[in-house]
Image (spheres, helix red, strand yellow):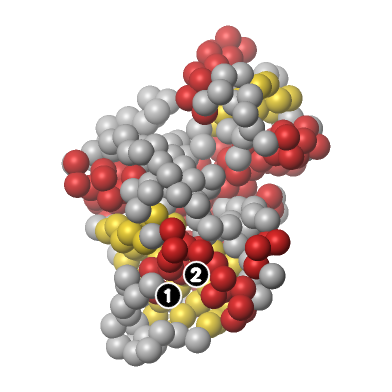
Amino acid sequence: MTSAGTADGRDTAVTRVDVDAAVARIAGHVRRTPVSAADPPAGGGALWFKLEQLQQTGTFKARGAVNRIRSAAETGELTAAGVVTASGGNAGVAVAYAAARLGVPAEIFVPTISAPAKVRRLHALGATVVQVGREYAEAYEAATVRADETGAAFCHAYDQPAMVAGAGTLGVELWEQTGGVDTVLVAVGGGGLMAGVAAALDGLARVVGVEPVGAPTLHAALAAGGPTDVTVSGVAADSLGARRLGRIAFDVAVGCGVRSLLVGDDDLVAARRWLWDRYRLVVEHGAAAALAALTADVYRPEPGERVAVVLCGANTDPADLG
């Protein structure tokens, strides 16, 4: 895999070696989430759900956050200033959780329009919350400046090797729990989860990225030959709302042959409802993207194909499920 540099100037190469190191690093700090066998689509050999919505903080992002902070401690990057990140969503909560778990100060920069409930959750986890700007980009810029000023370790939401490798530990677990699969369907926003799973399973299984038509970061990057800005909209924008695929994600996708499938908002809503009606599992709309590839018939398994669907998050309001 080639190396081009990430948002923080680090090397973009992430391999199974990095993921295996992350497995050891995060052990005891995050949950080993279960897999559940499901009824396979017509002609398919087997179907499993990786129940990552049961992870600490409700999403896979706790894996990357713990790995990032512990690896920063190993390399001497972590100082008494702790860690800084920008995110009022799942990534921010994950960093706050990991920092609290590891006894490290955390400062989370969020836009002023962030939902009060999310801000309260960050405070409850012991983080210092700084509200600045009306958009994520403004909070991100302020966070990077703060990290430079204080010497705190900056935690990118998805475009850092340690974040990606941590997310990839999910793939290692999945492989062990199922005894091996042919295909893994993964939702894509910034691409950290997709890249981690693809690196973990490179040479073992194909990884297919599934993304909303309203936020096609991987699709656009593959078409353009590199990460490019997209306009974000739709019901999953709160969790799959990255405007650009991460550089690491692009490099891994190209190196591992990951392809992109697009699903519509109606497909996401229907898949989320289908999961509740049939299995009484609650996920956010973004997490339903991977399943929507099957329920909307966008991905058709070959006869006998063993497929796993990653249900990556459950930070949602279940009231509309009835």
Which residue is pictured at 43% across the width and 58% down the height?
265
Q: Nearer the viewer, residue 301 or 137?
A: 137
Density class for disc 2 (Cα within 10 Å; few <14, some 14-19, many ≥20) is some
Asked if residue 296 lies left or right of residue 144, the reply is left
How many marks can you see? 2
Residue 3 in the image: state x and y as whole percent. Answer: 27, 36
Question: As shown in the figure, which amino acid type bears the numbered disc 1?
Answer: Thr
Q: Earlier in the sequence, mark 1 or mark 2?
A: 2
Asked if residue 231 lies left or right of residue 220, the reply is right
Which residue is pictured at 66% across the width and 40% down the height?
93
Query: Which quadrant: the N terminus?
Result: top left
Asked if residue 322 lies left or right of residue 10, the reply is right
Q: Secondary structure at mark 1?
A: helix
Res. 295 mark: 1
Residue 250 in the image: state x and y as whole percent. Answer: 30, 44
Res. 270 mark: 2
Density class for disc 1 (Cα within 10 Å; few <14, some 14-19, many ≥20) is many
Contact between marks 1 and 2 (CB within 8 A): the answer is yes
Question: As shown in the figure, which amino acid type bears the numbered disc 2?
Answer: Ala
Q: Quadrant of residue 321?
A: bottom right
